[in-house]
Image (cartoon, rainbow, N blue to C red):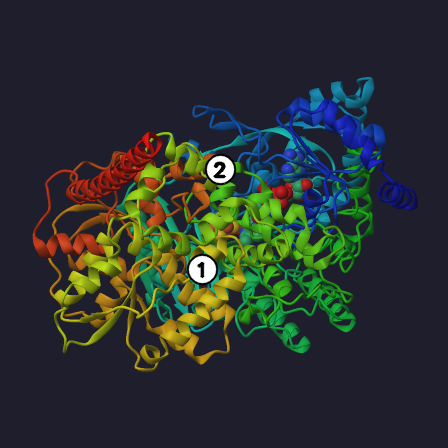
Amino acid sequence: MQKFAEIARAARSHAVNAAKLEAALRRNVRGDVRFDNGSRALYATDGSNYRQVPIGVVLPRDADDVTATVALAHELGSPILCRGGGTSLAGQCCNVAVILDFSKYMTRIVEIDPVRQIARVQPGVVLDHLRNAAEKYHLTFGPDPATHDRCTIGGMIGNNSCGVHSVMAGKTDDNIEELDILTYDGVRLRVGETSDAELEKISGEEGRRGRIYAGLKALREQYADLVRQRFPNIPRRVSGYNLNYLLPENKFQVARALVGTEGTCVTVLEATCRLVKSPPQRVLLVIAYPDVFECADRVPDIMQFKPIGLEGIDQRLVDYMRRKGLNAEGLALLPEGGGWLLAEFGADTQAEAQAQAQALVDFLGRSPNQPHMRLLIEPAQIRKVWEVRESALGASSHVPGEPLEWEGWEDSAVRPDQLGRYLRDLNKLMAGYGYRSTLYGHFGHACVHMRVNFDMQSTSGIANFRKFVEEAADLVINYGGSLSGEHGDGQSRAELLPRMFGPELVQAFREFKNIWDPDWKMNPGKVVEPYKLDENLRLGADYRPWEPPTHFQFPADDGSLAGATLRCVGVGKCRRSEGGVMCPSFRVTRDEEHSTRGRAHLLWEMTKGDVIQDGWRDEHVKDSLDLCLACKGCKSDCPVGVDVATYKSEFLSHYYDGRRRPRSAYAFGNIDLWAGLASNAPGLVNLTTQLPFLRDISKLVAGIPRQRSIPALAPQTFRAWFHERVAPNWDGPPVLLWPDTFNNYFLPDTAKAAVNVLEAAGFRVLLPNASLCCGRPLYDWGMLSRAKDLLLEILDLLEPAIEQRIPIVVLEPSCAAVFRDELLNLFPHDERAHTFSQQTYLLSEFLQSKAADFPLPKLTRKALVHGHCHHKSVMKMTAEEAVLQRMEIDFHTPAPGCCGMAGSFGFEQDKYEVSVAIGELELLPAVRRAPPECLIIADGFSCREQIAQGTDRHALHLAEVIQMGLQNEISLDYPEQTSVERRNLAVQRSMTRAGLGVAGIAAGAAILWTLNRRR
Ligand SMILES: Cc1cc2nc3c(=O)[nH]c(=O)nc-3n(C[C@H](O)[C@H](O)[C@H](O)COP(=O)(O)OP(=O)(O)OC[C@H]3O[C@@H](n4cnc5c(N)ncnc54)[C@H](O)[C@@H]3O)c2cc1C
Ligand code: SF4
């Protein structure tokens, strides 16, 4: 025992020559080798409480790259750590090691064999990608963690992951047939089930393979009885190594014995996974009891009805979601109660699935304490309720007004018939410490999730955390349960394993590791010979982040940028490649540094200041933020509301303090000024931006890529048009229309249409007396001093309108978002800001709340609707959709994500390709597929530009669509065509006039010059 402890300590403390290793890796590996401080900071933590800065990161392209990396690490004595999505919750995915990140390149599904029901995959394959591919054959990979859309098969094997459907298909260990593995000392093996004859043969071989099998055989012989006695016989024992698979009754299944070793034994290069039948028809029975404990008590009865999933959630979780405004639709579907069970039934036909659920309904209906129940059969509704369960972890982190909650006692498991008693005892234990937690989890297998409000920032708080975890461990062990029923031991629970398994079995675990990794360099300090559970904490008693003064006030984070960036708990939802809106740039690059999580972690590291040391001037942070489109997708999509767009703006304002910004910053950031100037001679300006050759020079000057077109200025601004006319409804209720820069100078038809709509609804339309700008483009460049000045100017000039509570209709969603979001973050204590923000409406919101009786015209058309990211994130699309429904428009919203243009982003030289790639993810192909008669609706100026420049269609603003209906002017095909032609013609004419003017002046000058010379 002593021997292993010493080897482990030596392995951990060996100083690695990182520079030499990096240079060697660069020479020998085709994939990416990243040893810079930014990359090291990015991978310093996972989803746990722990943080260890790695030596460097390698993103291997293939098995050869992995072999080369491991060989060089071995040569120089460097520890290694394999990594997939990095969503681990027990600290097993951070270490002082060379990290091998499989999630970018090693993502190939090698084979699916529907007859043998197996799939061969590389370790970086995301679970949902495998499931989608297998579903074509009505097959699936059974275990499905809540992170199914970003966790990798390698990570699932590492952690022995489970999920909702583990009650149907078991844990990951039950579903792995073979593994192609590499040991730290360079032996590559294919392992799986081993017959007695094979075992005899291999263990008698010379060489490393023979020694490994002989060692495993001897281990089995020594510990078999103890394994049978001491391994808890419960469905969710995930703690410890799977020595049970070496037993003869389990066919010496070496692959399964390696599942759950958390990267501490071998590197997985390829996995052969078992696929199970996926019931095509599913229904969900939601059962509500007065509290979660009663839910737990009923689990054994309910399990007899053989649901394919049985999950529980408690009232606190539901309350937290309500407070954070998450999953409103799913929550609305829960029947009345204080604790809920979600019982899913699946079968070949809908009728069969319903009949199974109905049998349970009848049974529970006859029970003394009848629950409230709701049987859901609509897939969309079922999905919404599952979203409630899947977002539980994020939803219970950073709840407004609540202390922070942490992992630490996250996934213990007992026998299902003891769940109710265990939960009550656990609750008592927490109460004794003054702790609170949500309670939810895989109740069918009696695995409970909770995040507790541990104090991780004081010595006494951390001491209490340790004491509580120790007592909770004793409690679960008294119940014959497992410390971990799902997430693994990592560092959180490894130290407690002797309590659960006893010293002899822990010695067996050491020997098992030693057989595979005699150098003890694979993910050292995790699972066996572990770090203490209160070592390497991400916060800790000495956590004193840098708190620089900021423009934004971060009112939801106690005024602290460090607090805001601490929000990211590593959930990794931003690493999804489909669904939701976040994060568009990660979807294109697949690099951690371009994920919301990566950016938040880097900024947090900047405030911590030990790896990222250059504060506001740090180039790593700058690079990572560079591709952020400031779409605010994360603000709404991330369950803890990480708001990278705001952090980016704050960072850039300091990064550029006293330095020159790129040319495009001045061109786009101050577009209101340039457009205002240019509107004095729009034809002339259009000549320079639209004519061949001249437009190329203009693009060069403004830093715009050659492939982009510069939008043409309208010959007459909206404000000029408005002031030329006699406005009707002089005694109607007033409404202030916000003439934003884009709709005033470039697309005034939109604002004119809005005037027509508002006046048709009986309102008196007013404009601000002066030209004002919300400053939206300034945020993209961190030009926050001017942005604040502009907002103060607005508050001053519009003070009378604010006081009179005159509603303000804003047509450009990104401008409305400034008033709803940035304004309050910059001036949280200015009453006028709050009132102004509440008075701001999008056109659709205004029509819904102030003109609900106005008979909107009916337009029985199909429409493709693309919501601007800020609209979706800050305002939500509810009102927009309600207006379209009032108009009987048959709309669909195919692209939940970003258009890729995102303000000036798509107009920047170095962003063009990413911008187009994002557009091509969903929106542009959907627009191209739309039939000619379909309306394309997009309210955002940049979205309309992306559509116009990337397809043969032009999008209309909602105001224009309503106007078309009011005027009954809509062509059958390409409904936008008439207004586009009208606009183009007007621009052409203005250019012709300007051209003639210029030619006239030039001719006059030439004549004068000639006459002069003759004289
Ligand atoms: C919000 C949230 C919800 C979660 N819900 C669940 C849940 O329902 N069920 C569940 O089981 N877990 C859950 N987890 C934990 C985690 O998501 C899962 O364990 C997941 O399967 C890990 O996958 P990953 O790709 O992120 O692995 P990572 O975290 O990257 O790695 C996990 C382990 O596998 C090892 N590993 C990775 N690749 C290899 C390889 N090629 N060779 C050898 N070892 C490797 C790593 O070293 C590490 O020890 C949840 C986590 C979060 C944040
Ligand atoms: S604002 Fe958009 S692009 Fe930027 S990090 Fe958030 S989701 Fe990603």
**Where residue 301 is drawn, which disc sits there?**
1
Question: Which residue is tagged 2?
Answer: 909
Q: Secondary structure at mark 1?
A: helix
Front position in the image: 565 or 755:
755
- Please state the horizontal and vertical placement of residue 23, each as a whole percent of the image: 78, 29
> With 439 as the anchor, is 507 left or right in this view?
right
**Placement of the N terminus among the 4 image quadrants:** top right
Q: Quadrant of residue 594?
A: top right
- Please state the horizontal and vertical placement of residue 801, each as a whole percent of the image: 31, 77
> With 447 as the anchor, is 822 left or right in this view?
left
Front position in the image: 73 or 966:
966
Front position in the image: 53 or 277:
53
Near mark 2 (Cα within 10 A), the count class, few <14, some 14-19 or many ≥20, is some
Count of numbered badges drawn on the protein: 2
Mark 1 or mark 2, which is nearer to you?
2
- Please state the horizontal and vertical placement of residue 789, each as a whole percent of the image: 48, 67
Q: Residue furthest front?
A: 1015
> With 572 as the anchor, is 946 left or right in this view?
left
In the image, what residue type sits under mark 1?
A: Asp
Q: Quadrant of residue 691?
A: top left
Q: Is mark 1 within 8 Å of ligand 1?
A: no
Front position in the image: 39 or 146:
39
| Whether residue 851 can be seen here | yes
Q: Quadrant of residue 369?
A: bottom left
Task: Please say if 686 is above or below 643.
Answer: above
In the image, what residue type sits under mark 2?
A: Gln
